[in-house]
Image (cartoon, coloured by chain):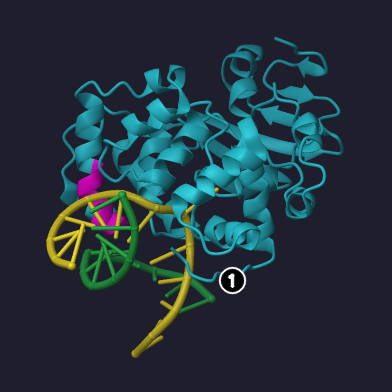
Chain colours: A cyan, B yellow, C green
Amino acid sequence: MDYSGVEFFADYVIIKDVRHFLPAHIFECGQMFRFSPMGTGYEIFAGDKRLFVEKAGEDVKLFPCTREDFKGVWHSYLDLGRDYAAVCEGYRGDEKLKLGIEHGAGVRILNQQPFETLISFIISANNNIGRIKGIIARLCQKHGSPIEGGYAFPTPQQLRDVPADSYAALGCGYRAPYLEKTVRAINGGFPLDVLRNLTYPDAKRELLKLAGVGPKVADCILLFSLGHSCAFPVDVWMGRIMREYMGEATLPAIQRYAAERFGENAGIAQQYLFFYARENKIKGLSST
DNA sequence: TTCCAGGGTCCTA
DNA sequence: TAGGACCATGGA
């Protein structure tokens, strides 16, 4: 692993001259929901970890963060091993992507914990980011372990006996029974982490067996936590922008088109296009 | 009051 | 297999 440009201190880390790294775009783009603007940076929670992330000039400061935390957790979580300049270079010539890269400069695809991502995106269905954040915060407070400054995301074991009514009381609405069923499946041995090693189609096929997981949620889980950077989640915003490329089209047609046009890093292209769509408030021909 | 949100499930044709 | 109704909730 290349840690050149990284300076380690007792309880913080400085990454020198980081390109393609803007905390606001990384944390507020709808790929994770446990973040708060804090001073000149962001406070984030991931699993049972808490981190402050600050951009100072071209440098990034992470704290509290030991050398072991950085190498064991945050380097991967923040996708610091990927050359985003090279990825963007591959998309030269696409006008919408070019604008998306301008609007969404500095966004990165996080490598989150699969269980947290699974539960979070079941909650995200037909929901808005503000409400999703609130529901997840209440879920952590009620069922997660207290940690410095907040609460850890609940483990599958901590949610083992939580009934649907309890999720509903947190504001999950009709998604509550999906959460109960899916937590039961995970505790029953569903091999969530193994999906990282399957092909994208096989991993997606397995995820679709879980309650509350449809094509879009499955792609979010695959992209944001299982290393399948070809996954191309199509939500209402992406549906709108892809219809600008293709005209009216079905979901399978959109995904085939995206795979051919954007290739193995279609998920990263998707994130830039998501920025483009939201920044330009693109209105859809239809929203499904 | 109505629309909308990083949709999924279930029923019907 | 495709299409559409229905599903909680709260902010705009």
In the image, what residue occupies the spot 56% across and 55% down?
A238
In the image, what residue occupies the spot 75% across and 13% down?
A3
Q: Is residue A177 magenta?
A: yes
Give percent across and percent down for residue A159: 24, 34
| Residue C7 found in image quarter | bottom left
Give percent across and percent down for residue A239: 53, 58
Secondary structure mainly formed by the magenta segment: helix
Residue A221 located left or right of residue A163: right
Q: Secondary structure at mark 1?
A: loop
Q: Which residues are magenta?
A: A171-179
Q: Considering the image in quadrants, where does the N terminus of chain A appear?
A: top right
| Residue A275 found in image quarter | bottom right
Q: Residues within 10 Å of mark 1 (few under 14, many from 20)?
A: few
Camera sees residue A151: no
- Residue beneath disc 1: A283
Identify the chain of the residue marked 1, using the numbered disc in the image.
Answer: A
